[in-house]
Image (cartoon, grey):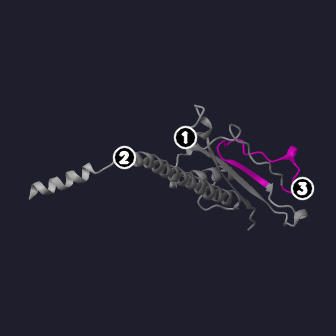
């Protein structure tokens, strides 16, 4: 009886054709690449969501007249930077992957409060100079009364995060650095109007 079982399984193993092995050899790499694409897209979406919520919290802290969780001696820009760092820490992301502005990206051009139009390139508000990885632009014009807006002023917070992993997709000609995930910057920016209490 046991001999017939082994004979049955050996017969099934002998019936396997080479075409099935070739099909598996073609399908498994495609499946693996699809799995990696889903993983990296999910990781990028995690970073984008974290930067969006972090810059929103930073903008809220920077415009608030009084912050109960901030230190009394810190500037609004330092409090905004701390809010971005806290958001990154809560998502287990490294704050050293934030790219300083001026190296690989330029801050947005925003006009000072009281501007009547968006053509203020010469008098645009620059980032707070003491903080280099989080661009905090205070007292900027968010909307203009001439374009149907209420003409509100506020604060803008911008960051760029560089994916710390290098993963290249095979392409021709080699080396293909344009598709390297380590060269991609993920942006986060939020604006908040000024509060008066």
Task: Looking at the image, tell me whether mark 3 or mark 1 is earlier in sequence order.
Answer: 3
Relative to 165, does residue 2 appear above or below in the rendering?
A: below
Name the residue located 76 percent from the left edge and 48 percent from the top edge: 108
Q: Is residue 65 above or below residue 186?
A: below
Mark seen at residue 169: 1
Per the image, the residue denoted by label 3 is 117
Residue 155 screen position, x and y as percent: 74, 56
Q: Earlier in the sequence, mark 3 or mark 2?
A: 2
Q: Which residues are magenta?
A: 113-139
Residue 142 in the figure: left or right of residue 57? right
Mark 2: few/some/many CA within 10 Å (<14, 14-19, 20+): few
**Residue 125 colored in magenta in the image:** yes
Residue closest to the eye, 174 or 47: 174
Q: Secondary structure at mark 2?
A: helix
Closer-to-camera residue (138/190): 190
Q: In the picture shown, does residue 149 fall above or below 46?
A: below
Residue that appears at 87% across and 54% down = 118
Indicate which disc residue 95 carries.
none
Mark 3 vs mark 1, foreground winner is: 1
- The answer to whether the residue labelled 2 contacts the one labelled 1, judged by CB atoms less than 8 Å apart, is no
């Amino acid at each position: 009886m046991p001999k017939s079982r082994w004979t049955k399984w050996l017969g099934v193993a002998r019936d396997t054709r080479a075409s099935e092995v070739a099909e598996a050899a073609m399908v498994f790499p495609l499946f693996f690449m699809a799995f990696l694409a889903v993983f990296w897209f999910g990781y990028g979406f995690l970073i984008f969501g974290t930067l969006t919520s972090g810059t929103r919290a930073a903008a809220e802290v920077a415009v608030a007249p009084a912050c109960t969780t901030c230190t009394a001696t810190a500037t609004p820009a330092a409090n905004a930077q701390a809010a971005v760092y806290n958001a990154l820490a809560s998502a287990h992301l490294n704050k050293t992957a934030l790219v300083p502005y001026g190296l690989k990206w330029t801050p947005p051009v925003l006009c000072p409060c009281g501007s009547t139009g968006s053509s203020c390139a010469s008098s645009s508000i620059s980032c707070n100079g003491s903080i280099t990885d989080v661009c905090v632009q205070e007292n900027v014009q968010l909307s203009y009364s001439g374009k149907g807006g209420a003409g509100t002023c506020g604060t803008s917070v911008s960051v760029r995060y560089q994916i710390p992993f290098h993963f290249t997709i095979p392409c021709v000609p080699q080396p293909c650095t344009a598709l390297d995930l380590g060269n991609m910057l993920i942006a986060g920016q939020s604006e908040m109007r000024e509060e008066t209490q």
